[in-house]
Amino acid sequence: MDATRIGLDEIARAAGGQVVGNGRRRVARVAEPEEAAADALCVVWMAEYLERVPAEAALLAGIGLVPAGRDGVEVKDPRTALAAVLPLFAPKRAATPGIHPSAVVDPSAVVDATAAVGPLCVVGPGARIDARAEPEGHVFVGANVVVGEATRIEAHVALREGTVIGRRAIVHSGSALGCDGFGFVPGRAGHTKIPQIGHVVVGDDVEIGALCTIDRATFGATTIGDGTKIDDHVHIGHNCRVGKNCLIVAFTGLAGSTVLGDGATMASRTGTVPHCRIGKGAVVGGMAGVTTDVEDGVFVSGFPAQEHRRELKQQALLRRLPELFDRVKKLER
């Protein structure tokens, strides 16, 4: 296979689709319509998008959407297919197993021979780096931290003492896991710090975006369930328990001891008060503030967050306030 170009027949196999036209045609990249050319593959969600795609570009499109005389691959769901196709074009990672000479590894740490510890990493006492794990450059791995098999920790991540990360996880650059939770007892003379003696446990197949913070528990563990995906700039407070396969979108903040059920979604810029429980499969709409528990499967929005349809109705009524105020003034006159 050409290292820089991929055939439409191979793309069809990866996407579970059917070739239309020349299956031997090779493309070098996936491109937006505005940047497409003869070497590009364009994804078409709907028929009306076709007019934006140059005639010379190949197509990845829904069933029946590749016009006669053009080359492409037809699939049931282009969005799902794209997730299978993009890895074909992704640069291959080639981390070299071993410990970089500039890394500092405590003698009591255990580093698997197939792991790749990058330049200027620090690996503390009692830490464990499992098979094919990859802490990149400038990663801090504190005392008794566990980095699971095939997990990638990107540059400038801090994993504080006792943090445990499962298998095949990804932690993106600049995130900090296991720092002290925000715990203080207010008093007239000042705020007395509550020692934070717990830790953080992250499950398998979790992805944590850049510049996220996940605080250690006051005692016990702050937990992130298997398969959960966390966007950039998310804060998860001490003793939170996030279930499996949750989605937490950018700029969300979970206050201490919040519980997210399996499959829950927190949209962008959402937040909770401490000790909230958000049910399995529930959705919290963008910019919502959760102040009470949310039941399983419910979609809430607004502040304070409430059932989404009720929130929309109230917003519609609020927009009518100027008109209603004018009518009241006329009636009073």
Image (cartoon, grey):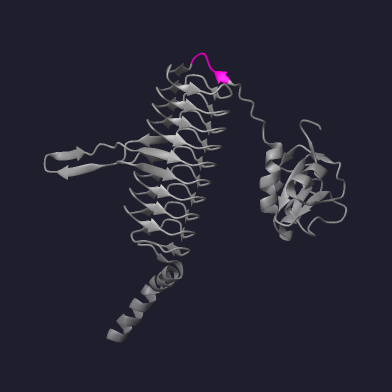
Residue at 40%, 28% (x, y): give it. 144
The number of numbered badges drawn on the structure is: 0
Residue at 31%, 86% (x, y): give it. 331
- Asked if residue 333 can be seen in this view, the reply is no
Of all residues shown, which one is farthest toward the top? Answer: 101
**Coordinates of residue 53 in the picture (x, y in percent):** 75, 50
Q: Which residues are magenta?
A: 98-102
In the image, residue 152 above or below residue 276: above
Q: Quadrant of the N terminus?
A: top right
245 left or right, relative to 301: right
**Coordinates of residue 72 in the picture (x, y in percent):** 81, 49
In the image, residue 118 above or below residue 73: above
Quarter location, residue 77: bottom right
- Could you say which is closer to the camera, residue 158 or residue 206? 206
- Could you say which is closer to the camera, residue 73 or residue 39? 73
Does the stretch in magenta take in 101? yes
Does the stretch in magenta take in 223? no
